[in-house]
Image: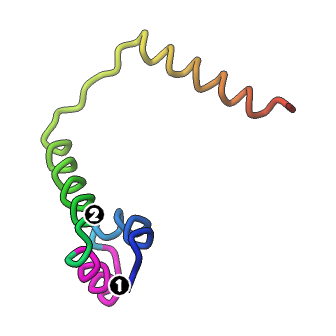
Amino acid sequence: MPSCKDFLRELSDYLDECLDPSTRQELDRHVQECPSCWVVLDTTKRTLKIYKGCEPQAVPTDLEDRLMAALQKRMAEKKSPS
């Protein structure tokens, strides 16, 4: 029987229905027996359903500029020897 960690690792493929039938069946069984994983699955499904119903929104230019600057700073820090 897969663990919760196994289930979370496979969650994206599970939702996309990309798993082989035996793995899918094992994960189905795990979700039925594990309340925590059931909640994760249910919440993720609901979130995706809401998200898919939304129209794309443009990111304000000032926010995009600040985000890009923060990412560039972070990348530069990682490249610099400590």
Task: Please report the bounds of the magenta region as a residue range.
Answer: 18-31
Badge 1 is on which residue? 23
Of 30 and 77, nearer the camera is 30
Q: Residue at x 16, y 51 (%)?
A: 46
Camera-nearest label, 1 or 2: 2
- Relative image position of residue 51 (x, y in whole percent): 20, 42
Does 40 sit left or right of 61 as displayed?
Answer: left
Q: Which mark is residue 36?
A: 2
Residue type, label 2: Ser
Question: What is the secondary structure assignment of the residue under circle 1?
Answer: helix
Of 54 and 30, nearer the camera is 30
- Relative image position of residue 69 (x, y in whole percent): 58, 17
Identify whether 27 is placed above or below 12.
below
Which residue reaches farthest bottom?
22
Identify whether 16 is placed above or below 28.
above
Distance between mark 1 and mark 2 Cα atoms: 19 Å
In the rendered picture of this protein, how many numbered marks are placed on residues?
A: 2
- Relative image position of residue 22 (x, y in whole percent): 32, 90
Image quadrant in which you'd find residue 12: bottom left
Q: Residues within 10 Å of mark 1 (few under 14, many from 20)?
A: some
Q: On the rendered image, what quadrant is the C terminus found in?
A: top right
